[in-house]
Image (spheres, rainbow, N blue to C red):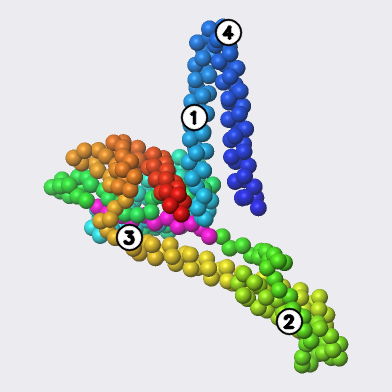
Amino acid sequence: MMKQLERLKSPLERFEELTQTADDAEVMIELAVEEASANALAEAETALAHIGVVLDQFDLQRMLGDEHDDANAIVTIQAGAGGTEAQDWAEMLLRMMLRYCERNGFDATLLEVTGGDEAGIKSATVQVDGELAFGYLKSESGVHRLVRISPYDASARRHTSFAAVFVMPEIDEDLQVEIDDKELRVDTYRSSGAGGQHVNKTDSAVRLTHLPTGIVVSCQNERSQHQNKATAMKLLQARLYELRRAEQEERIQEFHAGKKKIEWGSQIRSYVMHPYQMVKDHRTEHETSDVDGVLDGDLGGFIDAYLRQRAAENSELSSDD
């Protein structure tokens, strides 16, 4: 509940901040007009530029409405074939992810890392906690390709290396199972078997049917219908929780199945350090020549382009429907 409250409060607080900034800008503009103040005009321009940046952030977050977008993220990085070259590249990607988290206020915890044979890493797993962590980081799932002059090649030849990044939402288990009375069918019937005269001669046994799932539970051990219903509700809650847990396991397996389909060479993004400097995303065509900045965690442009493309595609699908 506290996490939900924080997710609701955060945009509201930013909206209130925007409103105050807009009011301040209006005052500065009036002052600039009345007194021909260059300083007031400069302050107003700064305030308006800030408003533009925050509105862009709001617009981006508006696109994060998929089922698990507000979940924490689990990021795994795996070196491709190629020995030391690929393992060094995997470590560079790990640093890039950690720097992105640091720059954007996410808490990143390194859960597992397997070192490379000579340098770099073979694999690593990071848990990323924060508002909309999975929503932002899901764009990084796929194969990343690096082209550079190898620091491990005595002949200074150009090498191409691959590493896979896979981002999965952390699916929380909620032990409190809410059951709507409208989703229940309650049947009462006369108990059978041992239990005494009262149990056998009244409709004290209870059968509960959960209509959405078809789960049926019953209880006839207690003396009263009220007691039997309370016990049956506990049984139903346990069954529904078990069903939910199984569904979560299936979802996790689906995400892992997606990981297995990643093929080396079907890269989502290329990082070229020689013979020219460029990072290009092959899904969105977004690119930049600031390779060092991207490897230092500046992924905002790529994530923005990916989310906007997804939103446009979803809009087209809705229009077709």
Mark toward the viewer: 1 or 3:
1
Instruction: Identify the residue at horizontal 61%, vertical 62% (top origin).
Output: 174
Structural distance between the alpha carbons of marks 4 and 2: 81 Å
Of the numbered discs 2 and 1, the one sitting upstream in the chain is 1
Asked whether the viewer can see residue 103, the reply is yes
Which amino acid type is marked by label 4? Glu
Q: Is residue 164 magenta?
A: yes
Q: Callout 3: 10 Å neighbours few (<14), some, many (20+)?
A: some
CB atoms at circles 2 and 1 under 8 Å apart?
Answer: no
- Residue linked to disc 1: 52
Asked whether the viewer can see residue 119, the reply is no
Instruction: Identify the residue at horizontal 15%, vertical 47% (top origin).
Output: 157
Q: Callout 4: 10 Å neighbours few (<14), some, many (20+)?
A: few
- Residue linked to disc 2: 219
Mark 3, secondary structure of its residue: loop
Structural distance between the alpha carbons of marks 2 and 1: 61 Å
CB atoms at circles 4 and 1 under 8 Å apart?
Answer: no
Structural distance between the alpha carbons of marks 4 and 1: 25 Å
Mark toward the viewer: 3 or 4:
4
Q: Which mark is residue 34?
A: 4
Q: Nearer the viewer, residue 119 or 110?
A: 110
Q: Position of residue 124 (x, y in %)?
A: 39, 57
| Segment tinted magenta in the rendering | 161-171
Mark 4, secondary structure of its residue: helix
Structural distance between the alpha carbons of marks 3 and 4: 63 Å
Q: Is residue 277 left or right of residue 256?
A: left
Q: Is residue 273 magenta?
A: no
Disc tally is 4
Which amino acid type is marked by label 3? Ile
